[in-house]
């Protein structure tokens, strides 16, 4: 059994690709949520979303490369490159057969699919672009990363809605733990801010209504006046390594992945379950060999929907008992939106940086704590947590799949 | 329409290849076009030259092969 070290991370976010600037934005509740209707490329529903404006594909790729790169693959490649660069993992040092890539994504290459259907149905074209299939397949991002890195170990894409990247990262950690890989690039990506996708989510009555006073405050996790979630886009990737592998090549170890569990509610297609979520958190604690009271922060799934937040709060209280009264919890989705398959990865990055910096982010827009959501919420401002040792990141998906990750600070 | 010149412009713009490198004997492979890029190029050739390229026509290796394929298909399909 090998301990799992995190030696690099990378991000593509509405605040750019620098993880430190990203974390500062999250700590300061600098919201990326805006009105879709302000965009000219609709038709959009009258709903807010958090999208990335400053990402220029030509800064990262040639025209030739872009012919097979959906926006999701672009994000994934840029974030994974940053993670590998941070880990200073160059190919010459690695046994490529022992290296692999696990990616989580919910909707895959949504943009390419929408463009194809638009061409076929709306424009009545019967000449579709020849690279439609390879650029839109759900595992395209992972394929591009292994081709670029030349890793020849496992290459798998996990698609379990909002838990996809927790599972990708957790399973990658297991691959290392059991000695089946020495280094894994793992993370998640989502690029779904497209009109048909947004209208489909809107039809499910899950998207937050625009806040009448400030659109950027529309997503209100755990608040009594919450009206739903806000969709976001982006990517976060990590370099995970066997502890001794990282040490032997002199890599800086940034954090430890300590535990992971993936479980199923087996109850309903979309309705969350207290028992299911509690089961996942307990299983992750067991996997990490930790007691509930040892967890010092939870980055909650906290979507801002009626059903999720009260369910998750009840599940946290059930698992942590009296410790829940003094266990800081926050949902950062209020400012970066819900990245579905990329959410767990982005939120793990926030969690790892919080562990490293001893400061956890607040839940923005938590105006009135819902009596059904009582927890030790980090309100208004970030909170200093100098003794933070272990933190949990929750992801609970449509389909009833849960993915819970537990990380440890490195002294 | 000068087939070679038009093709040269197409390849140069689409794949960011220096025009000077796109001479008749140059292989598509050395210009950096893999099999998927060739499919993508043929898609544009069909639009620009108003021809249909059948699946068994795509065994093209050099720029000259592409030029002669285009000229022949334009003749055969009455587009010359």
Image: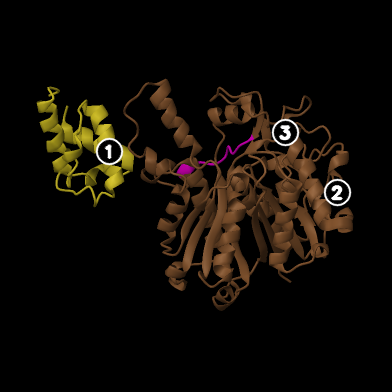
Q: Is residue A110 visible?
A: yes
Residue on which disc 2 sits: A375
Classify 10 Å Cα crowding around label 1: few (below 14), some (14-19), many (20 and above): some
Q: Colour of chain B?
A: yellow
Residue that mark 1 sits on: B41
Image location of residue A383, percent across then percent down:
83, 53
Residue that numbered label 3 is attached to: A228
Per the rendered image, the range of residues in magenta is A50-58
Chain identifier of the residue bearing label 3 in the image: A
- In the figure, is residue B51 to the left or right of A132? left
Q: CA distance from mark 2 to mark 1?
A: 58 Å
Q: Are marks 1 and 3 on the same chain?
A: no
Residue A284, percent from left and from top: 70, 61
- Which of labels 2 and 1 is toward the front? 2
Q: Height in image: A221 above or below A195?
A: below
- Which image quarter is the N terminus of chain A in? bottom right
Position of residue B22 in the picture relative to residue A36 (left or right): left
Q: Is residue A321 above or below residue A113?
A: below
Q: Quadrant of residue A294?
A: bottom right
Q: Which part of the image, by quadrant, shows the C terminus of chain A?
A: bottom right
Instruction: Compare residues A392 and A54 and report the one nearer the observer.
Output: A392
Name the side, left or right, on which B5 lies relative to A121.
Answer: left
Residue nearest the viewer, comparing A96 with A163: A163
Q: Nearer the viewer, residue B47 or A320?
A: A320
């Amino acid at each position: 059994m090998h301990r799992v070290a995190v030696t690099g991370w990378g991000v593509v976010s509405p605040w750019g690709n620098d993880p430190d600037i990203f974390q500062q934005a999250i700590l300061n509740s600098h919201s990326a949520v805006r009105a879709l209707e302000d965009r000219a490329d609709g038709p959009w529903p009258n709903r807010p979303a958090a999208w990335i404006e400053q990402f220029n594909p030509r800064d990262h790729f040639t025209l030739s490369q872009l012919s097979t790169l959906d926006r999701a693959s672009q994000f994934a490649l840029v974030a994974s490159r940053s993670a590998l660069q941070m880990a200073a993992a160059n190919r010459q040092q690695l046994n490529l057969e022992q290296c692999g890539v696990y990616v989580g994504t919910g909707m895959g290459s949504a943009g390419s699919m929408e463009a194809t259907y638009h061409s076929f149905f709306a424009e009545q074209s019967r000449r579709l672009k020849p690279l439609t299939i390879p650029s839109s397949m759900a595992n395209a991002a992972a394929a591009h990363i292994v081709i670029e890195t030349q890793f020849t170990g496992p290459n798998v894409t996990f698609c379990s809605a909002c838990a996809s990247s927790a599972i990708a990262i957790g399973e990658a950690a297991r691959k290392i733990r059991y000695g089946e890989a020495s280094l894994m690039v793992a993370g998640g990506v989502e690029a779904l801010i497209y009109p048909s996708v947004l209208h489909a989510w809107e039809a499910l009555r899950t998207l937050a209504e625009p806040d009448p006073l400030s659109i950027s405050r529309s997503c209100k996790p755990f608040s009594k006046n919450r009206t739903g979630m806000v969709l976001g886009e982006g990517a976060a990737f990590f370099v995970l390594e066997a502890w001794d592998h990282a040490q032997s090549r002199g890599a800086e170890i940034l954090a430890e992945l300590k535990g992971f569990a993936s479980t199923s509610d087996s109850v309903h297609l979309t309705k969350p379950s207290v028992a299911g979520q509690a089961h996942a958190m307990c299983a992750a604690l067991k996997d990490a060999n930790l007691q509930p009271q040892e967890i010092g922060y939870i980055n909650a799934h906290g979507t801002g929907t009626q059903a999720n937040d009260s369910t998750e709060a009840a599940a946290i209280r059930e698992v942590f008992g009296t410790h829940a009264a003094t266990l800081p919890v926050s949902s950062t989705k209020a400012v970066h939106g819900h990245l579905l398959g990329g959410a767990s990865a982005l939120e793990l990055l926030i969690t790892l940086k919080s562990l490293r910096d001893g400061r956890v982010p607040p839940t923005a827009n938590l105006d009135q704590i819902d009596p059904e959501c009582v927890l030790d919420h980090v309100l208004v401002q970030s909170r200093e947590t100098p003794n933070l040792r272990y933190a949990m990141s929750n992801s609970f998906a449509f389909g009833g799949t849960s993915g819970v990750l537990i990380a440890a600070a490195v002294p | 329409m000068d087939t070679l010149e038009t093709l040269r412009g197409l390849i140069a713009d689409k794949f960011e290849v220096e025009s000077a490198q796109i001479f008749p004997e140059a292989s598509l492979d050395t210009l950096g076009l893999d099999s998927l890029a060739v499919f993508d190029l043929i898609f544009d050739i069909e639009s620009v030259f108003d021809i249909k390229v059948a699946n068994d026509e795509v065994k093209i290796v050099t720029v000259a092969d592409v030029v002669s394929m285009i000229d022949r298909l334009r003749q055969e399909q009455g587009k010359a």
